[in-house]
Amino acid sequence: MNYIDSHAHIMSEEFQEDFDAVIQRIHDANITGIMIVTTKAEEALRAIEFAKSDPARYKVAYGIHPEDIRTVTEADIARMEEIVSMDEIAAVGEIGLDYHWEKEMKEEQKELFIRQIEIARKVNKPILVHSRDAIQDTYDIMKEHRVKGLMHCFPGSLEMGIEFTKLGYYIALGGAVTFKNSRHAKEVCAGIDVTKLLSETDCPYMAPVPMRGKRNEPSYIPYIVKVMAEVRGISEDEMAAIIAENYERFLEGR
Ligand SMILES: [Zn+2]
């Protein structure tokens, strides 16, 4: 069985101290596809260098996170466009809207989101979308500015999840699906088109049960896929195989 982590911040400082051990556990757990998500130019370039060690396993994404809306400059956006144009970048993200951390500046966030979607269209790469307390605005923008991509750590209802898949977007689920009180995530997992489902850790955040509260890492993906399989009523083998196929299609921009 092989596993996919479609959203991992393994270049972040939380992993600097024991990076080699984290990578070893990725091998031991047979996580064969990892999207390294970066949110700073410098971090993206480090990820590109690292991914060269095992390009089949590691893909790199870069985008300007909505939490950085107060500090982002025109020069940052120009640099972002330059970096995501590189062949070594597989996806644009994470980008999106966050009305939880940043209740003001909604218009500025929308504008930055749309600009980055249009950059993704130009470089012909899928987007990884972060949406928090902003699902309707996220949907409206992704409907109007339609590209390929995925909803990371999908926060919405099943009904909303179905609407996103109708537009062609994938839905990635993470640790939340393993939480006892995660009705939404389980309903989404059970109810959406299985060919649109992906697994992710969002590490170092959102560790799944039984690791909840600890630093998350890619080798915890099996805990998530196990619950996804239970919710779907299929074997873990089947679930892992479906996710791996979906991820291939996602990377091909289909
Ligand atoms: Zn993330």
Image: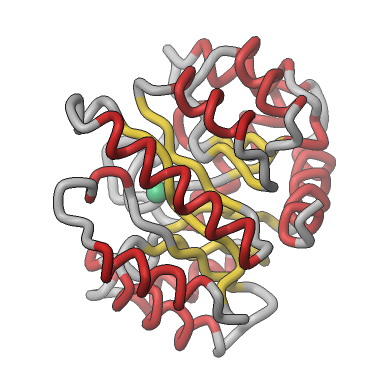
Number of marks in the rendered image: 0
Q: Residue 152, position in %: x, y?
A: 51, 40
Q: Residue 140, position in %: x, y?
A: 54, 24
Q: Residue 81, position in %: x, y?
A: 45, 69
Q: Quadrant of residue 252?
A: bottom right
Residue positioned 82% across, 36% down in the render? 195
The reply to whether residue 178 is in sight is: no
- Location of the N terminus by quadrant is bottom right
The reply to whether residue 93 is in sight is: yes
Residue positioned 37% across, 70% down in the render? 78
Is 4 positioned to the left or the right of 74 in the image? right
Q: Is residue 218 above or below residue 87?
A: above
Is 60 positioned to the left or the right of 87 in the image? left
Q: Is residue 223 above or below residue 187?
A: below
Q: Quadrant of residue 46?
A: bottom left
Residue positioned 42% across, 59% down in the render? 63
Residue positioned 23% across, 75% down in the render? 17
Q: Quadrant of residue 85?
A: bottom right
Q: Is residue 247 above or below residue 57?
A: above
Is 60 positioned to the left or the right of 237 in the image? left
Q: Nearer the viewer, residue 147 or 161?
A: 147
Q: How is the image coloured?
A: secondary structure
Q: Nearer the viewer, residue 162 or 195?
A: 162
Is 112 positioned to the left or the right of 52 in the image? left
Q: Residue 187, position in %: x, y?
A: 62, 13
